[in-house]
Amino acid sequence: MPVAKVGAVVLDCPDPRALAGFYAALVGGTVEGEGRWVDLEVPGGPTLAFQEAPGHVPPRWPETDGSQQFHLDLTVDDLDAAEKEALALGAKPLDTQDRSRTFRVYADPAGHPFCLCAC
């Protein structure tokens, strides 16, 4: 029997409300809160929380001397369509060399890496 369950995945960022809005547009859900801590209540998933971190330095991917700190794998039905939407929302591609893989790597507006993964 587990001792705990996932309550939230928390991302440090310079602007919690803006980053919560980015992920709400990408995965759905309801943005709640203002100020230094904002939650995104995701239907059927754990809460994504965004915490203000003054001086936030984005992770570097795939640098071997840096840490990606964390990343999200987001499952999609159509990689090309999902990529178009993510880019329009402000995502930046991090890995465009191999388009034959079942996943693609991006950075969110605060620089955190995430992957769009084909089902």
Image: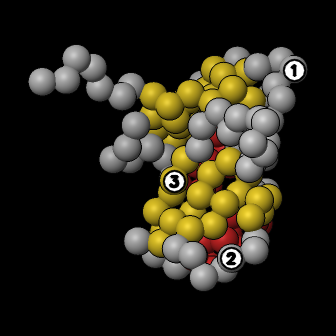
Is any part of residue 91 visible from this angle? Answer: yes
| Tag 3 secondary structure | strand
What x and y, as percent, mark residue 28?
51, 53
Q: Residue at x 52, y 79 (%)?
A: 78
What x and y, as percent, mark residue 68?
68, 39
Query: Could you classify mark 3 by the number of other residues whose Cα lies within 10 Å: few (under 14), some (14-19), or many (20 or more)?
Result: few
User: Mark 3 and mark 1 in contact (Cβ < 8 Å)?
Assistant: no
Residue named by callout 2: 98
Tag of residue 4: none
Residue named by callout 3: 73
Residue named by callout 1: 55
What x and y, as percent, mark residue 5?
29, 26
Q: Earlier in the sequence, mark 1 or mark 3?
A: 1
What x and y, as percent, mark residue 19?
70, 40
What is the tally of numbered marks visible in this picture? 3
Determine whether 85 is above or below 106 in the image: below
Is any part of residue 35 visible from this angle? Answer: no
Label 1 to label 3, Cα distance in Å? 26 Å
Label 2 to label 3, Cα distance in Å? 17 Å
Q: Residue at x 50, y 31 (%)?
A: 9
Q: Identity of the amino acid at label 2?
A: Asp
Label 2 to label 1, Cα distance in Å? 33 Å
Tell me: 24 left or right of 112. Answer: left
Q: Residue at x 73, y 21 (%)?
A: 52
Q: Earlier in the sequence, mark 2 or mark 3?
A: 3
| Tag 1 secondary structure | loop
Of circles 2 and 1, which is in front? 2
Between 1 and 19, the one lying in front of the other is: 1
Query: Could you classify mark 1 by the number of other residues whose Cα lies within 10 Å: few (under 14), some (14-19), or many (20 or more)?
Result: few
